[in-house]
Image: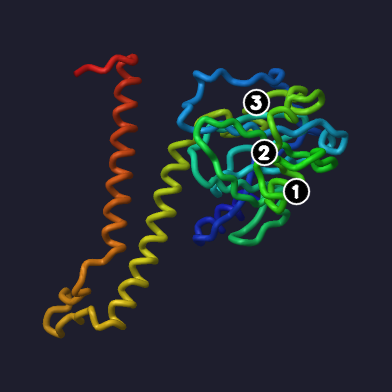
Amino acid sequence: MAVLATAILASGCTVYQSIGKSVGSFLHPVSGHDFVHIDNDQWNQNNALIYFYRTHSQWAAEEIEAPSVYIDDTHYFNIRNDSFTWLEVSPGERHVAMRRPLLGLEGLNSFSLSLIADATLGIEPGRIYYLRYNELSAPDQPHPDLDPEHALTQGDLQLVTRQYAMQADELVSTRFLNSDLLAPNHAAVSIAEVNEDFDYEKKMALLEEERELEMERLKEEGKYESASWFWPFGGGPTVPLESDQKIRELEKEYAALEAERQRREEVESSGGWWIF
């Protein structure tokens, strides 16, 4: 199975898989500590925190393979019966997806074997969000901040309020989803920088498409000079491209972001003291 996944990856396709990470509670019950919120000084308040939890059920306890959780198309963990974990995320539009694996494989490109959830959640800085997964029972009422038709107000994965999550037999009854050899995961960490890089690449791709469309429009308007036969590197638009200006602004913003990251790393490596 792993050899097959490797071969498909080499072909350039997007493979969704959690081979070696998808073991369910029937084979590997969760054994982490009882639920507790992480301290506020453990996460950057300019970002946001998402708690994921799955309440106990006999069905989930007998599960052979646990479903995978993805943020912005990156796999982070497989959520087993009676467990919780968290991720610190960057503000913005975060795409949340859950897929059920079959021997670790979950899908190829736009095809999914079993797509449990596929939603976009608008994340605001400093806020804490609670995502509840339960395949047998739904919350009593949808989250008041979401449109009633939002994907996270229906189905097995739903956004719930803190008050709902803190009820008995909900989040407070779960145990921490440890990462170990039988079920490794990449949760309980900050993925804010990964989110920021994802947002930059997504915006840049959109601007490159916008630039191509702008070039075509200028050609139709006669504001484009073709290259000479003797100098193929000449030619181009006769007026400045608006998309080029947007691309330069985006690159400038990202350069400032990288500089700030470097500054933080230097402060942390020096023990918190900034040497001028």
- Amino acid bearing label 1: Gln
Q: Read off the residue under disc 2.
A: 78
Q: Which numbered disc, 1 or 2, marks the residue that appears first in the sequence? A: 2
> Which element carries disc 3, helix, strand or loop?
loop
Q: Which residue was labeled with disc 1?
A: 154
Going 46% across and 40% down the picture, which residue do you hit?
Answer: 194
Residue hosting label 3? 178
Q: Is residue 200 above or below residue 182?
A: below
Amino acid carrying label 2: it is Asn
Q: Nearer the viewer, mark 1 or mark 2?
A: 1
Task: Name the mark nearer the viewer: 1 or 3.
Answer: 1
Which of the 4 quarters of the picture holds residue 143? top right
The residue nearer to you, when weighing 225 against 241, is 241
Locate residue 38: give its quadrant.
Answer: top right
The alpha-carbon separation of the residues under discs 1 and 3 comes to: 28 Å
Helix, strand or loop at disc 2?
A: strand
Q: Residue furthest left?
A: 230
Q: Quadrant of the C terminus?
A: top left
Q: How many numbered badges does the structure rendering display?
A: 3
* Spot occupied by residue 81 in the image (x, y as percentages of width and height): 77, 33
Label 3 Cα neighbours within 10 Å, binned few <14 / some 14-19 / many ≥20 = some
Dot 2 alpha-carbon crowd within 10 angstroms: few under 14, some 14 to 19, many 20 or more:
many
Q: Position of residue 223 (x, y in %)?
A: 23, 79
Name the spot of residue 246 as percent of width and height, x first: 31, 57
Q: Amino acid at mark 3?
A: Asn
Residue lying at 74% horizontally and 39% vertically, measured from the top left: 133
91 relative position to 77: left or right = left
